[in-house]
Image (tube, rainbow, N blue to C red):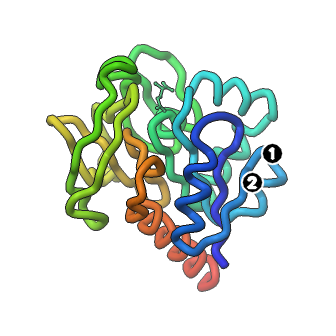
Amino acid sequence: MVKIGVLALQGAVSEHVRSIEACGAEAIAVKSRSDLALVDGLILPGGESTTMRKLIDRFDMLVHLQQFAAKGKPMFGTCAGLILLANKLVGYEFAHIAALDATVERNSFGRQVDSFETTIEIKNVAVDFPAVFIRAPHIVEVGDNVEVLASHGGRIVIARQENILGCSFHPELTDDHQITAYFMEMVKESLAKKANV
Ligand code: GLN
């Protein structure tokens, strides 16, 4: 069975676990470097990126998360998770895991009161996905190797660069598991590639 981890330091962890299990994979809460070694792919949940970064540093996981991505293992960041993945953040001099060649702006869809839900078409994934935005970031710009899968109101909200997937919104808060299933296919592809080398 494919093993998908959810970084479980802070944020919407149990919702992702539920979605992974609904897709027929094993979900593992990743709280340490040794947990990370057990999984074939990793989801970085929504929550608060600054808090998550502090905890990543406290548990000495940053380099290990960077290596996980560099080895070609799939990572999927939702909302705060997207912020952790981006290699440039508007208004900040530093990035976090920096595995996705994209510039991300935090809280760019407004404050908590401006949270909203809308239906979007996502290339190769879904024609009418219910996207929930909560103090969401958006992708301002992507590098040449990054494929934009959907935009909303002229802003990029989900993009993929090989083994890295990032989205602004919260698929785990709905009962639509199509994005999780798409990520699971990415994980299966990476395992098949590994088996062939
Ligand atoms: N605004 C949060 C941050 O900057 C992200 C919000 C979310 O994950 N729902 O980390």
At horizontal 60% and vertical 36% (from top left) the residue drawn is 11
Amino acid on which disc 1 is placed: Ser
Residue 162: percent from left, percent from top: 43, 60
- Does residue 67 sit above or below 185 in this rendering? above
| Location of residue 176 by image quarter | bottom left
Disc 2 marks a residue whose amino acid type is: Leu
Left or right of 160 in this view: 53: right
Q: Which residue is mark 1?
A: 32
CB within 8 Å, label 1 to label 2: yes
- Residue 42 in the image: x percent, y percent? 61, 55
Disc 2, SS: helix
Q: Which one is nearer the viewer's eye here, 15 or 104?
A: 15
Is 29 placed left or right of 186 in the picture? right
Q: What is the crowding at mark 1: few (fewer than 14 residues within 10 Å), some, or many (at least 20)?
A: some
Alpha carbons under labels 1 and 2: distance apart: 6 Å
168 over 177 or under it: above or below = above
Element class at badge 1: loop
Nearer to us in this view, 37 or 52: 52
Q: Which quadrant: the N terminus?
A: bottom right
Residue 77 percent location from the top left of the image: 50, 45
Residue placed under numbered mark 2 in the picture: 36
